[in-house]
């Protein structure tokens, strides 16, 4: 592992973010950034910011940016956020509207040549 970055409590459902994480896992950093720039998923913008942060952390350690790959990209479920809104349910009841949140982590490593 050369560098890592994490975004905690991101307001994106884990199921949606995992699609984007699996899209970039194992790819080079430049290729992944180019791919994410043209991906029309809402989690792509969060992962772009996170990947740029991990790249900046790697450059602090004097790593070669051309030889970096995304070795690990994980998305975990964070505690759900309750909105101050109500959804009607059966038998006259009501429940709070909950929105999914995620913890996203990316690790960069040197490509094996």
Image (cartoon, rainbow, N blue to C red):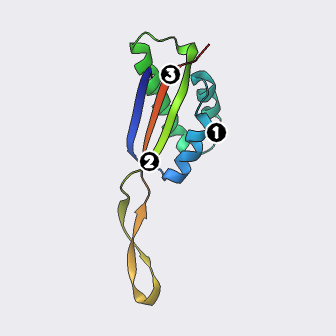
**112 up-or-down from 25: above or below:** above
Query: In what element is the residue under mark 1?
Result: loop
Q: Of the residues under marks 1 and 2, which one precedes in the sequence? A: 1
- Disc 3 marks which residue? 109
Q: Which residue does the image show at 51% across and 36% down from the upper left? A: 73
For this rendering, which residue is in front, 53 or 109? 109
Q: Tell which residue pokes out farthest to the front in this image.
A: 112
- Disc 1 marks which residue? 39
Query: In what element is the residue under mark 2?
Result: strand
Q: Which residue does the image show at 35% across and 55% down from the upper left? A: 79
Q: Of the residues under marks 3 and 1, which one precedes in the sequence? A: 1
- Disc 2 marks which residue? 76
For this rendering, which residue is in front, 89 or 21? 21
Q: Position of residue 56 (x, y in %)?
A: 43, 20
Residue 51 visible in the picture: yes
Q: Tell me the CA gap for discs 3 and 1.
A: 24 Å
Q: Position of residue 41 (x, y in %)?
A: 60, 45
């Amino acid at each position: 592992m050369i560098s890592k970055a994490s975004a905690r409590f991101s307001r994106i459902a884990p199921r949606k973010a995992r699609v984007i994480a699996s899209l970039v896992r194992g790819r080079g950093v430049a290729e992944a950034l180019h791919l994410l720039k043209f991906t029309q998923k809402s989690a792509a913008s969060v992962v772009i910011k996170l990947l740029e942060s991990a790249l900046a952390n790697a450059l602090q350690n004097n790593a070669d940016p051309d030889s970096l790959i995304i070795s690990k990209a994980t998305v975990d479920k964070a505690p759900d956020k309750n909105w101050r809104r109500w959804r009607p349910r059966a038998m006259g009841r009501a429940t709070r509207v909950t929105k999914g949140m995620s913890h996203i982590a990316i690790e960069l490593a040197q490509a094996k040549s």
